[in-house]
Amino acid sequence: MNKVLRQFRSLPIRSRLALLVAAAVAFAVAAVSVTCWFIVQGKLYDEVDSRLASVNGRMLLNPGQVPAVLASCTQTANDSDTNRRPSFLYLQLVTSEGKTCVLNDSEGVVKVTATDKEVAANPDASVRTFHNSTDSKGNDVRVAAIAVPVGPGPNPQAYPDVAIMAAISLEDTQNTLNDLALILLLVSGIGVLGAGAAGLWVARAGLRPVDKLTDAVEHVARTEDLSIRIPVEEDSEDEIARLSRSFNSMTASLASSRELQQQLIADAGHELRTPLTSLRTNIELLTRSEETGRPIPPADRKALLASVTAQMTELASLIGDLQTLSRSDAGTPADRAEAVDLQDTVEAALRRARLRGPELTITADLQPWFVRAEPQALERAIVNILDNAVKFSPEGGVIDIVLKGGELTVRDHGPGIPSEELPHVFDRFWRSPSARALPGSGLGLSIVARTVQQAGGEISLRPAQGGGTVATVRLPGAATPPPEAV
């Protein structure tokens, strides 16, 4: 059985569907055919039983006639008359002891059964039975046995218990049933073959969109061409259409992800080339000085070493930002997200910001707010926002920070961001022309946006009234800590 199931599962899906349809139709046709055959058999037997009942009714004997009939009858049918036409009717008497008396014109002798003897022994004339039996030649017959009552008379005990047996040959009935069985078998076979063909056609027609989807997937796997799309009717809502839309959405997302990866690689290569080129130039100058024996003046050497250190610091910062961005692209796993006190996170970022801008005035109005995020990533995002505010604030400037109702605003009094540059501030490696001379990789705000989005929040930048920029971060949460954080 397991081997058959394995072979069935190894077949193509359209073949399995065709076989299942054919099997279901075969079962239904077989059930209907068998039911029909038995119904027709019952109707034919009922018709034969009605004929036998009428024959038996005409053959009822007066109890007083029983001895004479028994004395004059024979034990076998009279077959000596070759000119006698077959009547296909069997008439005989049977006693409770099993003795038979074949009446005139009977087609033959019917074998007596125990049922016939029981009917003969019963004095009730309403008792009759219908059953199948055979004659002396082995032919199938339908028998009706009815008791002959022993009525009043001078000597009732002298009359034996007798039943009349009338039988009709079942040859015609069986021929009819055999013909019906053959017809039903042929119809069933044609129906099963037709169902199998129809099932195969339906499977092919129904799975044609799946074939297209399979071809598309194989094409993508073979060529890595993510531009392929499967045409889908707009008003179609069946499973195949939904699967096709999901595939198109998946390939579009993969294509977009590939473009972002290629853009990230190109931008990262461009950003890494500048510090690496400068670093290589400075190191080559130091190496050539050592090889040629021409020492570099101490002041120039010190400046070169300071430049190398700054470039290495910039390179390390860029690599760290790329690593942070790659981790944020991978999402925030549930095991890294936890309840975070946003007020404490902002206060920790404030301490670092005050160290980087001691000449600045930083005011803070912080109220409790608890969010669910990755603690380190969220702190890094807040630090990046404050670093931008410190970087672009003039000396002696003021930075106002407010945390209220899950909304964090950071307002600086720097030069601000032109309105035409606002749509690009969260793009990777994008830097304002006025800020390209300042240190940075252009990834800070991109990291902030990705972290805030993964925490279920949103971030925006807008020009501040009176100059400067306002950064607004909204994060879902609550003013009270969740139960697991208590």
Image (tube, rainbow, N blue to C red):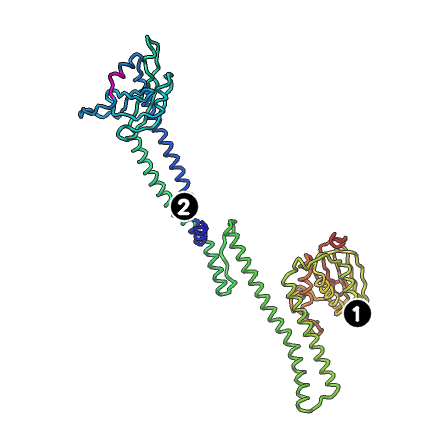
| SS state under label 1 | helix
Comparing 282 with 6, the one in front is 6
| SS state under label 2 | helix
Q: In the drawing, what numbered circle is on residue 355?
A: 1
Would you call the spot at circle 1 few (<14 residues within 10 Å), some (14-19), or many (20 or more)?
few
- Which secondary structure is most common in the magenta stretch? helix
- The C terminus, quarter of image: bottom right
Quadrant hosting residue 163: top left
Relative to 70, residue 27 above or below: below
Would you call the spot at circle 2 few (<14 residues within 10 Å), some (14-19), or many (20 or more)?
many
Marks 2 and 1, how far apart in space?
Answer: 81 Å
Q: Measuring from the top left, give residue 51's x and y in whole percent.
A: 31, 23
Q: Measuring from the top left, give residue 154's x and y in whole percent.
A: 32, 8
Which amino acid type is marked by label 1? Answer: Leu
Relative to 72, residue 308 above or below: below
Residue 341 horizontal side relative to residue 69, left or right? right
Comparing 63 with 439, the one in front is 63
Comparing 454 with 43, the one in front is 43
Residue 242 horizontal side relative to residue 1, left or right? right
Residue holding disc 2: 22
Q: Which residues are magenta?
A: 69-74
Which amino acid type is marked by label 2? Answer: Ala
Q: In the drawing, what numbered circle is on residue 421?
A: none
Q: Is residue 91 visible?
A: yes
Q: Identify the residue shown where x is 71% and y is 88%.
A: 296
Residue 223 horizontal side relative to residue 146, left or right? right
